[in-house]
Amino acid sequence: MKELMTKELEEVLPKLYATENIKLEEKILQVRYRSINSNWEWYLVEYDKDKKLAFGYIKGFENEWGYFSLKELEEINDECLSIIRDKTFQKIEFIELDNDYYKVKV
């Protein structure tokens, strides 16, 4: 199974709610996960290592901000490897992400 989270990442990621006063376009996308079987992507901004719960931006059927569970993503991988952590991803501000969010929402 591919490792979705490392101890090193857990120690440096912002805790849940740590960036709530930062504008959406300025939030830092820290980690990217992607499905190798679909076009779904999860961008982690904040993380609770005890609950394995993340807040971030999700690109799927609809693109939206919200919470997602790394535990659930790991369970999907237990069935079949389909979600990986993009180890080449470099942190970026949300506004830099190539998406249509601002064309519609702002």
Image: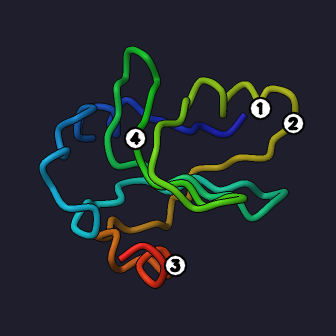
Q: Earlier in the sequence, mark 2 or mark 3?
A: 2
Look at discs 1 and 2 and give the one toward the viewer.
1
Three-letter residue code for mark 4? Phe
Mark 2, other Cα within 10 Å: few <14 / some 14–19 / many ≥20: few
Q: Residue at x 72, y 59 (%)?
A: 61
Res 47 → quadrant: top left
Question: Label 2 is placed on what type of residue?
Answer: Cys
Secondary structure found at label 3: loop
Q: Nearer the viewer, residue 83 or 16?
A: 16
From this view, report whether residue 3 is shown above or below residue 100. above
The numbered dot on residue 76 is: 1
Q: Which residue is mark 2?
A: 80
Q: Nearer the viewer, mark 2 or mark 3?
A: 3
Residue 10's spot in the image, x, y percent? 33, 32
The residue at which mark 4 appears reads as 55
Residue with the mark numbered 3: 99
Identity of the residue furthest to the left in this view: 21
Residue at x 19% of width, y 44% of height:
20
Lower sequence index among marks 4 and 1? 4
